[in-house]
Image (cartoon, helix red, strand yellow):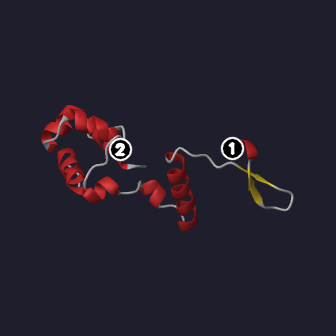
């Protein structure tokens, strides 16, 4: 999950509007909207101010879901890798040959 998704998720969980978070963090509602859409990257100071507005610590903001954290390390690594891969907007395109090696799909490069 990226920062934009975290801000939105935590704000909704706190049952606060963008306007209320902006007011509490001394930011504009438009800027909160840009952050939530991933069109701006916040500084550490801004993340701390948003956390204060949401009533959470920065550690809570970046905490991994307890269900995922409880997974065995190899499964956790797979889930985390897959989550990061999916959020990048790219899909894996490979075809396994008879010899067992992965080869990029020809139509994926076009």
**Distance between the alpha carbons at the discs numbered 2 and 1:** 28 Å
Asked whether the viewer can see residue 27, the reply is yes
What residue occupies the far bottom of the structure in this picture?
A: 73
Residue at mark 1? 108
Mark 2 near mark 1, Cβ–Cβ under 8 Å?
Answer: no
Residue at mark 2? 4
Residue at 54% across, 47% down: 86
Residue at 16% across, 40% down: 27
In the depicted view, which residue is nearer to us: 84 or 58? 84
Badge 2: residue crowd in 10 Å (few <14, some 14–19, many ≥20): some
**Secondary element at tag 1:** helix
The x, y position of residue 108, in whole percent, is: 69, 44
Quadrant into which the C terminus falls:
top right
Residue at 81% across, 61% down: 100
In the depicted view, which residue is nearer to us: 13 or 89? 89
Asked whether the viewer can see residue 13, the reply is no
**Secondary element at tag 2:** helix
Above or below, 58 relative to 40: below
Earlier in the chain: of badge 2 and badge 1, it is: 2
What residue occupies the far front of the structure in this picture?
A: 110
User: Horizontal placement of 78 versus 42: left or right?
Assistant: right
Above or below, 36 relative to 81: above
The x, y position of residue 90, in whole percent, is: 57, 46
The x, y position of residue 51, in whole percent, is: 22, 50
């Amino acid at each position: 999950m990226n920062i934009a998704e975290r801000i939105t998720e935590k704000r909704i969980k706190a049952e606060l509007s963008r306007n209320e978070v902006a007011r509490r963090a001394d930011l504009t509602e438009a800027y909160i909207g840009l952050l939530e859409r991933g069109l701006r990257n916040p500084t550490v100071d801004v993340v701390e101010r948003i956390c204060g507005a949401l009533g959470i610590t920065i550690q809570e903001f970046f905490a991994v879901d307890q269900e995922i954290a409880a997974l065995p390390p190899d499964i956790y690594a797979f889930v985390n890798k897959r989550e990061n891969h999916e959020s990048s907007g790219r899909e894996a395109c490979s075809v396994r040959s008879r010899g067992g090696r992965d080869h990029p799909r020809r139509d994926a490069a076009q």
